[in-house]
Amino acid sequence: MANREFAANQEALGIEDHLETLCRLCVEIHRSVADASDEFYEELRRKNYTTPTSYLDLLKTYKDMLTAKRAIVPREIEKYKNGLSTLKSTNAMVD
């Protein structure tokens, strides 16, 4: 399967534990777009093509979003820790 090969080659993603679920999800998304494209054609007589390239774009988008979130989450955790520390010190002062 192309999606497994693509994901397996992305060692930096660190998604090994979730690889099977992610592969099934990507396939389902791609199929649902194909189904919606068929409905779109039936209603409006306009074609929308789902190609292997669009599938690879889906995988690339996931990878890009995962990378972006991995950069954001540690900063957010640090903000919450700082806020918690401030609350604790304020609570100590009030006591």
Image (tube, rainbow, N blue to C red):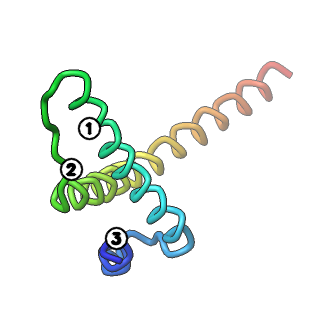
The quadrant of the rendering that contains the C terminus is top right
User: Which percent across, then down, holds residue 61?
Assistant: 27, 52
User: Which percent across, then down, holds residue 4?
Assistant: 38, 76
Residue ID for mark 3: 3
Ranked by sequence position, the earlier of labels 2 and 3 is 3
Instruction: Judge the density around disc 1: few (<14), some (14-19), many (≥20) Cα neighbours within 10 Å.
Output: some
Q: Is residue 82 above or below residue 5?
A: above
Give the Cα separation between the discs numbered 2 and 3.
Answer: 15 Å
Q: Is residue 87 above or below residue 30?
A: above
Residue ID for mark 2: 50
Q: Is residue 83 above or below residue 1?
A: above
Q: Nearer the viewer, residue 56 or 91?
A: 56
Please identify, in this view, whether the residue under mark 1 or under mark 3 is nearer the observer: 1
- In the rendered structure, the answer to whether residue 93 lies left or right of residue 79 reads right
Q: Nearer the viewer, residue 78 or 69?
A: 69
User: Which percent across, then down, holds residue 37?
Assistant: 26, 38
Give the Cα separation between the discs numbered 1 and 3.
Answer: 21 Å
- Marks counted in the figure total 3
> What kind of element bears circle 1?
helix
Ranked by sequence position, the earlier of labels 1 and 3 is 3
Q: Nearer the viewer, residue 59 or 11?
A: 59
**Marks 1 and 2 in Cβ contact (< 8 Å):** yes
**Marks 2 and 3 in Cβ contact (< 8 Å):** no
> What kind of element bears circle 3?
helix
**Disc 3 residue type?**
Asn
